[in-house]
Amino acid sequence: MRSHLLFWLYKPSLMFISLVLMLLVALPSQAASTILVFGDSLSAAYGLSTQQGWVSLMEERLKNERYPYQVVNASISGETTAGGLTRLNQAIAQQKPSIMILELGANDGLRGLPVDAMQQNLTKMLEMAKQNNIQVLLVGMRIPPNYGPQYTQAFHQSYPTLAQQFKVKLVPFLLENVAGNRALNQDDGLHPTAEAQPIILETIWASLKTMLNKK
C-alpha cells in the first residue's frame, strides 16, 4: 500500500522529468554562427597549403578560445572587387554569415583599375551586407606608387572613407609588418610566406575579436 502511495506522490515529478528530457532530445543543437572570409589570394593561402593560411589559423583560434563560429573561406586568387561583387549575393544566400571579413581591392590596385570603380564595387558589397544584417570587417590594402602619388593616395583613402561611411570596423592594412620584408614574402614579392600568416592573423584578430560573441 505504501509503495503505491509513494508512486503516486512521485508520479508528477517523474512525468515532468520525462517531458523535459523528451524536449531536450527533440530540440536541435544551436548552429554556430558563420564568418565569411571574402577576399583574394592573400586570404586564399596562395602558394601555401590551406592549413598554413591565416584563415585556417583564425578558425583554429576561434575553436581553441571556444567562440561558437564556423569559418567559410570564399576567397579566390586574382579576384577583383568587380568579380567579388558578381558572386557575393550568392555567397550570402548560401552561407548566411553573421560576420564578413571583406578583403578585396589589391588586384584592382596592382592592375591600375579606376579607384572610383573599386569604391563603387565595395560600396555595393557593403550595402548588400547591411541589407542582410551582416557585420563587416573591412580590410584595407596599400600598393606601391607605380601609378603615381595621386592614384596611390586615392586608393589608400578608399578604405577609411568607406569604413566611416558605413560605420564598419577597419583593418587599415592587411600586410602590416609583413609587406617589404623579404623573409616574410614569397619569391614574387607579393604573397606572404607561411611564417607571415600568424602575423597577418594578429592584425586581423585585433579588430575581429571586438565583433565576436561567446554566447
Image (cartoon, helix red, strand yellow):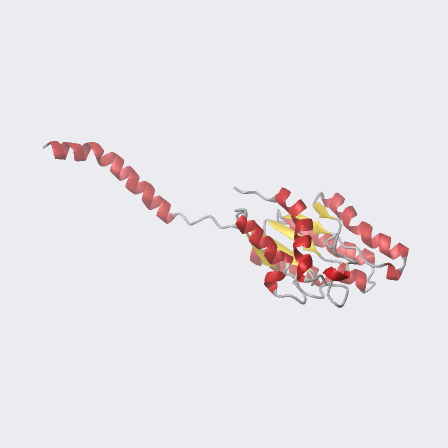
Residue 182 position within the rendered picture, expressed as x and y whole percent measured from the top left: 77, 61
Corner quadrant of residue 87? bottom right
Camera-nearest residue between 97 and 182: 182
The answer to whether residue 130 shows anywhere in this view is: no
Of the 4 image quadrants, the one containing the N terminus is top left
**Residue 214 figure quarter:** top right
Residue furthest to the front in view is 183
Out of 188 and 81, give the one closest to the viewer: 188
- Residue 187 position, x and y percent, is 75, 68
Total numbered labels: 0
Identify which residue is drawn at 63% across, 60% down.
Answer: 53
In terms of depth relative to the viewer, which is nearer, 82 or 35? 35
**Residue placed most toward the observer, 173 or 51:** 51
Expressed as whole percent of the image width and height from the top left, the position of residue 104 reads 72, 57
Which residue is depicted at the point 82% across and 56% down? Answer: 116
Q: Residue at x 65, y 54 (%)?
A: 198
* Visible residue check, residue 79: yes
Q: Vertically, is 112 above or below 120?
A: below
Q: Residue furthest left?
A: 1
159 left or right of 38? Answer: right
What residue lies at 57% left-to-right and 56% top-to-bottom? Answer: 95
Describe residue 59's horizontal placement relative to residue 171 as left or right.
Answer: left
Residue 150 location, quadrant: bottom right
Relative vertical location of residue 38 with respect to residue 68 in this rendering, above or below: below
